[in-house]
Image (cartoon, grey):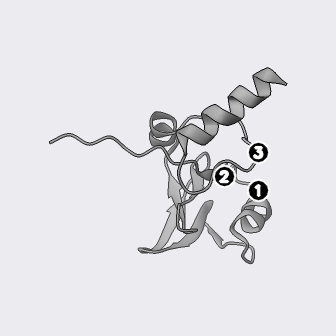
Amino acid sequence: MKFRKKPVVIEAMQFDGSNGQKIADFMQCQFPAIQDGKLLIGTLEGTMSADIKDWIIKGVKGEFYPCKPDIFEATYEKVDELPNILNDEIDRADVQRHLKQETTV
């Protein structure tokens, strides 16, 4: 059997070694621990570490976890912000209606 990943919009920040406070703000927590140049993140599976250039992803249930850059680039693409029509999943009919309204205005 084959499966396709559902189209889900996520939020993410890339760790650059110096943006720990920005990531803490993104995660809405105190400054995360950095040990041996790695960012330590509490996840649903326990503490995980993120290396420089890893992405910190906010999952669909509000959880956070690190993702290697090559996996992130193979899995995600940047999306433009759409005003108030995206919730947890994309409603294609709403997107089409929104885009049609923009072109007729």
Q: Nearer the viewer, residue 50 or 66?
A: 66
| Residue pointed to by mark 3 | 83
Amino acid type at image mark 1: Asn
- Residue visible at 41% across and 46% down? 6
- In the image, residue 34 lies at what x, y percent? 65, 68
| Residue pointed to by mark 1 | 19
Q: Do tag 2 and tag 1 residues touch (Cβ < 8 Å)?
A: yes
In this picture, is 29 found above or below 4? below
- Judge whether residue 76 can be spotted in this image: yes
Q: Nearer the viewer, residue 72 or 62?
A: 62
- In the image, residue 64 lies at what x, y percent? 56, 65
- In the image, residue 40 lies at what x, y percent? 58, 69
- Residue visible at 56% across and 57% down? 88
Amino acid type at image mark 3: Pro
In this picture, is 60 found above or below 4? below
Q: Which mark is residue 15?
A: 2
The residue sitting at the right extreme is: 105
Amino acid type at image mark 2: Phe
Local SS, label 2: loop
